[in-house]
Amino acid sequence: MKISLDWLSDFVDLSGLSPQEIADLLTMSTAEVEGVDIIRRHVEGVVVARIVSVESIPEVDPRLKWVVVDCGGQTFNTVCGAPNVRPGLTSVFAPAGTRLAEGHVVSAEQIAGRVSQGVLCSPRELGLSHWHEGILECPGNLPPGTLLSQYIPAQDVLIEVDNKSLTHRPDLWGHYGFARELSAILDRPLRQLGMVDLSTFDHLPAVPLEVEDFEDCPCYGCLLMEFPAAEPAPLVIQRRLHAVGQRTFNLAVDLTNYILWELAQPMHAFDGDLVRAIRVAHAGSVSTFVTLDGQERQLFPEDLLIWDQRQPVALAGIMGGLATEVRPTTRRVLLESANFKASRIRRTSMRLDLRTESAQRFEKSQPPINVKWGVARFLYLLHESAVGVQVLSRFTVAGDLAEEFRTVKLAAGELDRLAGTSIPAAQAVAILQRLGFQAKSGPRGELVVGIPPFRSSKDISIPADIVEEVLRIYGYDNIPPQMPTFSLRPLPVNKTLRLEHRARRLLAASHLFVEVQTYGWMDDRLLEAIGYEPQRPIVLKNPLQSYNRLLRTTLLPNLFALIEKNRFHRQEFRIFELGHVYQMGENGLPCEEARLSGLSFSAQDKYDLEEHFHRIKGAIEDLGLVMAAGPFRFKLQQHDGLPWQRAYRWLTVWQEDRPVGSLGVLEGDIRKVVIPEGGQVVWFELDMEAIQGILWPAPRYEAPPAFPGSVQDFSLLWDAAQGYEALNAILDQFTHLLIQKREFLYVYRGKGLPEGTGSYTFRYWIGHRDRTITSEEIEAFRAEFLAFLNKHNISLR
Amino acid sequence: MIAVESILQEIEAALAEAQTPEQVEQVRVRFLGRRGKITLLGKETDFRSLSPEQRRTFGSQLNELKRQAEEKIAAALADRQQRAAARAEAQARARLDLTLPGRDRRLGALHPITLVQMEMEAIFEGMGFMVLTGPEVETEYYNFDALNIPPDHPARDMQDTFWLEGGLILRTHTSANQVRALEKYGAPLRAIFPGRCFRYEAMDASHENTFYQLEGLVVDRDISVAHLIAVMKALLGEVFGREVKVRLRPGFFPFVEPGFELDQQCPFCDGKGCSVCKQSGWIELIPCGLVHPKVLEAGGVDPQKFSGFAFGMGMTRLAMLKFGIPDIRLFNSGDLRFCEQFPVVI
């Protein structure tokens, strides 16, 4: 929203304040100002000129005309190419030597044997706006030769307010709303908006009017009148419309736009000879409509239209129709001032991408009272324009104008309680009154407030809204900060979050992992390439990319995709992500859980894959200790699972009897997709919800043996293909009273061993708790153990 | 008589050749040893053939020669020993270079969002707030209706929100947790809700469809604007490590009334105006306000008895400010050249 200080000054005295000070006051009490722009116009030396004659010069350019202008007793010759140049038109003339916008200095020029002594000016040449489609048209009653600077000052200041901060304030979509704010902030009087008393026309006939849906159109008002609608509007109107970026057309249209920018009430002027009756109804079976910009619009049945006796004449609240707009010949105008439901206007205008100034205002829920005030203001401005006006109908209204003040009461002390400071009642009352509210203190100290009809009920309805009105003018910075006092009590600890952070810290602080974050959806193209079909995924209705439809059901595909992205600058890396995955549950309810997934990549194919895998497995084992206070167990999987889970190449991870995740090495066809240039990938994914975490574990202390024992190492030959776990399981069966601990030291597979076997070295600690072990006992233990091995066909190396 | 000078020159020449303490010792033996040249001078001279005068002269010359020879050899020995020690030290140092960088480091890196989140959680826990989390796949009710956002509000358009089947959405703000928390814990309540949020939005350097917020909610008896200002000032003081100047100005959010934008005086220019604050001297940091009575009611809390304030912070934005990250798209890029830069905090 752009606000002209020139315009505001009609209503409130801004003297003594710089534009920046005004902007700061508005920011602190009303809405965020985004910028202050100074408009510099080039009006000096420019005079009002009446066009006497227009003559073609086809030998030079068929579009160019020789024009003779009367500038008040003095005539000038000029060449003009504007399409709207015509005899009798009052425009403005810049004689040679005049400095115009964009640094252009007018000079006398010889054209086709005659001298052009100056130029007729467009709004852009005058610095009024960027419109350059024709020369400025002035009302015919301006005396030729008058200095343009009498009507258009050389400077104005525009304050630009962030539209997002005005969404709840329909009254601030017009200048008068901001004038009222400044009046309240500065405590300076607000001048009344000039309006004509519409009741004086009550004796006239009504306009035939029918509203079919009062929900979408709560109130519709109209007035039929006769005036020179196609004449140019007064320059004060035009200069202000130009200042806010609004193109000017003619008196009727410019006045509706002026009121849109002043009171925030969008209006429409129909040609009153073409439109004689009004019906407000939905589009229904009508599928197209041509708006006044000449575009044919596709309609939905629920779109709201304004109809005359036979056909649609306007897209309600958005744009009028081409067929019934005000034309050069128009004398009669049927003026529409209506109120439409915000969401109806919003849906239609968004769908058609027709974001007009009118639609933007209706979307904010304009108050119905503006239906009446818009018409009353229109007539007032028409009289100000000094043109002949004849009103032909009464002000005809259907629906509720909601003219009454709405009452809300603040209990005694409510304002102070919510402010956290003491605000004198008289001061609160004065602030509210300056904002146009009725306010008085009640007998029991309560504040009785009347909400004015021009403030939307969506904006102001409850006591807290009144508190805001008072405090923002009182000044939030005038409220001394005060720390609340709270009772001391233990708060529930977020165990899940703490364990998540603990897992993150372990991986990043002890295992070289780098934490990454990826998007909450997967890439269909990657899923198809690796052959992954998610079960019951949740589907986005409006994905940003068509291939990002599915919310992630696992974090791994997104992590796989990061390998190719990073391998050109990293030979090896470890990454993890802790984030949510989503799935539709069997019961139709969404199921969301936290996963901890990661991978380790090495570009070296020759790197020892087993070593690589076990380093990552070590990290998972550490995670078990820090999160679950006990070791995870692992089970080798003999069948393929998901595309990255290949038989004998992945393990499931268990906490006691619950599966909590999986880890493995990337093998098979998926490698061609994930690592087309080769390398090794070890991956894991843990289900954080399945892990039963312990925040502060308390393991029991065990005293070390008090008497000397013995350490016995055994290197066992074992079928390497069967693996360590199978051997370990056999050793678990050997129980002996002397055994205090068994530890796996290392495996050797290589030269000097029978084909396919490995040498697995274990260490046994043996001893007594209450006495020193004897050499006979050690020998007996060894003999028993060797016999056990023999029984299982296991030999020592 | 004895050729003192020539013998001394002979010794000096020999010492000049001697590089090691051992070689100096060999020189000593050669001249002063049991069969050394100087020793032999004393032994092999026939004193009887000398007059008493000559004997005295010989004796004193021999003593002087011995003294000087010993002195030179001792000096040379000390010198060679020192040099040998210096060599040994250099060799030892060459084997043990303590200035090489440390090894076997196991540190990776935490994501900058995680770092900011951990910091914020610590600050708020220190102020007696619970840390709560909620679902990212959310219902329209908690994300909109319960927060007094009407059905035809622009925020509900497809243009702003990711819609899922079954009337579900990806939450657009962590405010969605407010009513969930009130339902579960009731009043009084002090809690923050950090989490991931989603907006249907085209991406550029300052817009992301996936980002992190931190919502805060305080509900108690007689909670006021004055409390809100004091808590926000204390919070920002902790975050930025010094007292900060803030200002409160009107802002509109359907779930608060009154609603504010809390601006912080720009920490980069101290309010003088710079590119970060777009020359305004202020940074828009925390939208906040008193909890709307309808929100309290939705959470089962009586607005006649309790009031509260709520605030929202962009954690992604905070991370950008804190670490000087110029492009918001880096956070979800998975680019290790970005992710590796942030240290692990234990």
Image (cartoon, coloured by chain):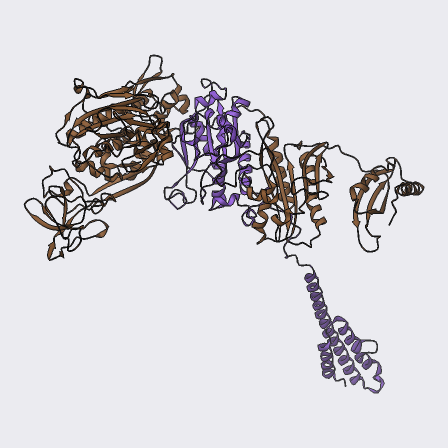
Chain colours: A brown, B purple
Q: Is residue A715 above or below residue B21?
A: above
Which image quarter is the N terminus of chain A in? Answer: top left
Left/right placement of residue B55 relative to residue B345 reads right
Left/right placement of residue A796 relative to residue A66 reads right
Q: Is residue B222 above or below residue A83?
A: above
Please indicate, yes or no, whether residue A515 appears anywhere in the rendered image: no
Left/right placement of residue A30 relative to residue B91 reads left
Viewer-nearest residue: A517 or B234: A517
Viewer-nearest residue: B298 or A635: A635
Q: How many marks?
A: 0
- Where residue A498 sits, quadrant-wise, is top right
Q: Position of residue B124 (x, y in %)?
A: 53, 32
- At horizontal 81% and vertical 86% (from top left) the residue drawn is B51
Viewer-nearest residue: A71 or A113: A113
As drawn, which residue projects farthest toward the top? A443
Q: Position of residue A71 (x, y in %)?
A: 9, 45
Please indicate, yes or no, whether residue A287 appears anywhere in the rendered image: yes
As drawn, which residue projects farthest toward the right? A776
- Where residue B3 sits, quadrant-wise, is bottom right
Q: Position of residue A533 (x, y in %)?
A: 60, 38
- Where residue A634 sits, quadrant-wise, is top right
- At horizontal 18% and vertical 22% (from top left) the residue drawn is A393
Q: Position of residue A211 (x, y in %)?
A: 30, 21
Left/right placement of residue A655 relative to residue A68 reads right
Q: Is residue A4 above or below residue B17?
A: above
